[in-house]
Amino acid sequence: MKSTIAQDKTCMSVPDNHFRRDVIRGLSARQKYLEPKYFYDATGDRLFQQIMESPEYYLTNAELEILQRQSNAILGSCLQYQRRFDIVELGAGDASKSLFLLEQALQRGISNHYYPIDISGNVIGQLEQNIPGKLPGLAVKGFTGEYFHMLDELARYSQGPKLVLFLGATIGNMQPEEALHFCRELHTYLNEGDLLLIGFDLKKDPSVILDAYNDAAGITREFNLNLLRRINRELEGNFDLEKFRHYPVYDPGTGACKSYLISTEAQKVTLCGDTEISFDKDEAIYMEVSQKYDMRQIEQMARKSGFAPVQHFYDREKRFVDTLWTVPSLKTVLGNH
Ligand code: AVJ
């Protein structure tokens, strides 16, 4: 049925980079897809900021509330395992939520080193510039790049105990199997007694979830279409944005909230001068998953990836959880089985 055969003869005017290769691979697949990490160009960063401020997108406020009200309790819980530790953040973004925790940790003499890691160099530059003024005494050293590459780098700077933050339900952009794999790999970077605080969005009223990815103002729609716009700009694409419809779905059975762009007609799109992609009418591009969890799944993921759950921190409406895990001693692991 599908007639798409993308031929990537090398086009000289578009550099052969990861973005180009990933986009062509995704749009040449039987089920077309694009990778959500590419949403975040300058416009994408701005649109995501607007999503976070939209009334339907409850995740950010819920997690902000957790860190505003419970940073001290979180640190108290960490102190059962470590007296002092460096704080590492994966996907730090603007760090607006983590600042509450960093401030308390600094005040209480628990930590004075913060290592944010982000794919966006823009973001890291801003953090290194702004945080020292806000939290004098906190040493900030940022890393720009893929998480595990940057954790390899980090090992040269920080050898002691660590608290790793992975907030914002960023892990939701992975399917559950992939997320488990990710946690297992993260575990290999940590030592006994190290800590991980990780944010999951929780299963809830399906229409509340769907609305968060289908806001009335259409920002999420723009956010998705912006990736086509980025392809047009950076890969000499000719996507007609009018011919793609934003279609989010939430399956309460699996907890997967997925976003698609649907081609409203049969059409061909050219990239990089000579790569042609054909779309059937109503064919979908799978854009991203925002996976929702329940507490049983979260505790299971902790154990299956070699961590031990320590404590769960919820917002008052229990829409979201920041869950604290530790790397247990081998003795404890064996004792549990
Ligand atoms: C940044 C992955 C947590 O899935 O909720 C928001 C991204 N996409 N609206 C999410 C997103 C559409 C967001 N994460």
Image (cartoon, rainbow, N blue to C red):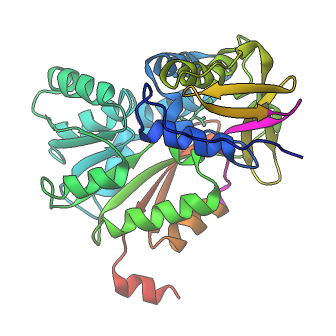
**Does residue 6 sit above or below 198 in this rendering?**
above
> x and y percent of residue 25 in the render?
60, 46
Q: Nearer the viewer, residue 138 or 288?
A: 288
| Nearer to us in this view, 334 or 13 | 13
- Residue 65 visible in the current orientation: yes
Q: What x and y, as percent, mark residue 176?
A: 63, 58
**In the image, 199: left or right of 246?**
left
User: Residue 14: x and y, percent?
Assistant: 44, 28
Q: Which quadrant of the figure has residue 263?
A: top right
Q: Is residue 57 visible?
A: no
Residue bounds of the magenta highlight: 279-295
Residue 144: image quadrant is: top left
Nearest the camera: 94 or 62?
94
The image quadrant where one finds ligand 1 is top right
Left or right, 152 with respect to 199, comes to left
In reply to whether residue 226 is colored magenta, the answer given is no
